Amino acid sequence: MIYFFYCLAGFVSGIFGGLGMGGGTLLIPILTIFLDFDQKLSQGINLLSFLIMAIFSIYIHYRHGYIVTKNIWPIIFFGVLFSILGALLMSFLPSKILRIGFGVFLIVLSIVEFAKVLKK
């Protein structure tokens, strides 16, 4: 039965990741809430799976002309820089704080997206 949930987590995060919507937004809650994984472990699993899914997604999106490479280097530079800083920060914070922070992030994201729908 547990393998069903592993497959479900991979399926859901893969679909959303492939759509460019961030599979980790669903993968991390599935791992922490339903499979009782530690927050840090869930984030690590998410990052590893993201790398693999991103390679295929980038190739497909680029092949169809959905990726514009103009001015991409500053985005890559600062993305890598702040990923390193975030990973270092994460290593010092307890899992409970990370879990609360991620929950607040999801709530804010939900409110923003809901407001966009109401505005239209």
Image: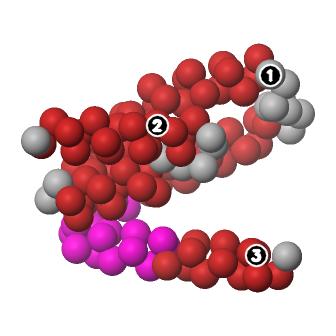
Q: Quadrant of residue 12?
A: top left
Vertical side of 27 occupied by 6: above or below: above
Residue position for label 1: 64
Q: Indicate left or right for 53 with 18 as reference.
A: left
Residue 14 - label: 2
* Residue 30 covered by magenta stretch: no
Give, as a three-letter code, the residue at label 3: Lys
Q: Which mark is residue 31?
A: none
On screen, residue 13 versus residue 94, left or right, reads right
Which dot marks residue 116?
A: 3
C-alpha span from label 3 to label 1: 27 Å
Q: Is residue 40 visible?
A: no
- Residue 41 seen in the figure: yes
Amino acid at the residue labelled 2 = Gly
Q: Residue at x 12, y 42 (%)?
A: 2
For image coordinates 33% across by 61% down, the residue present is 29
Q: Amino acid at mark 1?
A: His
Q: Residue 9: x, y in percent?
A: 32, 44
Q: Earlier in the sequence, mark 2 or mark 3?
A: 2
Q: Nearer the viewer, residue 96 or 56?
A: 56
